[in-house]
Amino acid sequence: MSVTIREVAREASVSVATVSRVLNGKGPVHPETERRIRKAAKSLRYIPHGGARSLITRKTSTLGVLMPELYGEFFSELIRGIDVCARRAGYHLLVSSSHSDRAETEEMIRAMRGRVDGLVVLSPDVRPNVLKANLPEKFPVVLLNSAGGRGSFDCLNVDNFGGATAMVRHLIRLGHRRIAFIQGPTGNRDASERLRGYREALRAQNGGSFAPLELPGNFREESGYEASRKILELKPRPSAIFAANDSMAIGLLCAFQERGVQVPEDFAIAGFDDIPIARYITPPLTSVRVPISELGSQATQRLVEAIAAGPERARRQAMLPTTLVVRASCGENGRARSRRLASSGDG
């Protein structure tokens, strides 16, 4: 049997209300009384009931995080940024994955209701009307890389379009005229914005004379690996390949190494996200750096501020800039160099 607050009160010879004030940090209590209560709680190994405490304070001290999946370095870096900021603000995390399934997404949102004080959502399948239907009115929510929600929710996006455009322009400046693109999953906003940037950069060159060459992908290493076979069968072959994320670019590099294809001598390769491993593979990968950990920490800070401000707060939108990071995989050797790409701020 677990120890109750009544037993702590009896051991310390005080009322239950006094024990509650001490353990919840509410109201003045004489220092000697507080010392006696904490000593009693420790000796009895009393653990406050989180559910009961939340009924009193109407706060759970927990933040919800909903993502499409938890696989890969991108999501681990994002969660790291969220966790550091949450712990600094005194919050725990409740993390769940929707597996990009709409029904499961709605189920996860409903499951978190009443268990968290606010919610960070990164999911291409979540629409504002779904959140409104499954959460209390004006519940604190921060959306990451979402197409909707302006005015209704705080939104924090990454300049995927600008980053992809800059990468294609860089490859063109290196002399590449036939540039292949390995796409991300259908319905994913990051993937669609990166594809749009690729197409726009090609269209803008010489009146659209650079034809797009698009291959299917799903953000997983194996789809980049599989793309290698199709690329080697193309006639004429592209001279550069831009993958919509680093994981696919790494899968492609692995397949080329197995087949004896030289990078960057035979193909220039570039990725997107600049996950930590990108700089350590051979050759080091040229990429568009997304401030992944910062994205998580900024989203969490906004959520903490929204919880503190209350339901009548103004909703904010912001765009995080990306950075072009040039390494040896695209044919430029030597020390890596980076260039921050312009992007809009708070809206």
Image (spheres, rainbow, N blue to C red):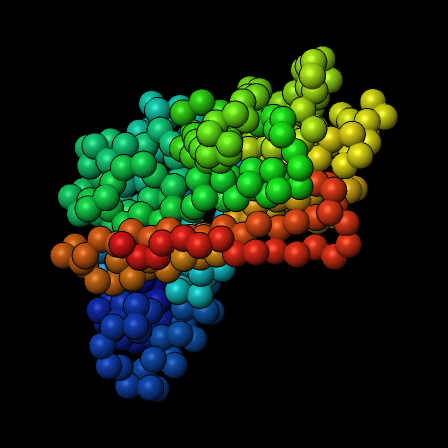
Location of residue 252 with respect to 339 vertically, above or below: above
Outermost residue toward the front in this view: 206
Question: In the rendering, at what x and y percent does residue 229 appear?
Answer: 71, 16
Q: Quadrant of residue 44?
A: bottom left
| Residue 273 as seen in the image, left or right of residue 117 | right
- In this rendering, does residue 16 appear at all? yes
Outermost residue toward the right in this view: 260
| Residue 218 as seen in the image, left or right of residue 119 | right
82 or 176: nearer the eye?
176
172 or 9: nearer the eye?
172
| Residue 125 as seen in the image, left or right of residue 295 | left
Q: Residue at x 48, y 56 (%)?
A: 294
Q: Residue at x 81, y 27 (%)?
A: 261
48 or 208: nearer the eye?
208
Location of residue 177 with respect to 55 vertically, above or below: above
Q: Residue at x 40, y 53 (%)?
A: 343
132 or 242: nearer the eye?
242
| Residue 315 as seen in the image, left or right of residue 144 | left
Question: In the rendering, at what x and y percent does residue 89 appear?
Answer: 39, 65
Question: In the rendering, at what x and y percent does residue 42 appear?
Answer: 45, 69
Question: In the rendering, at what x and y percent does residue 107 appear?
Answer: 32, 29
Quarter holding the C terminus? bottom left
Q: Quadrant of residue 113?
A: top left
Q: Residue at x 77, y 49 (%)?
A: 333
- In this rendering, does residue 299 appear at all? no
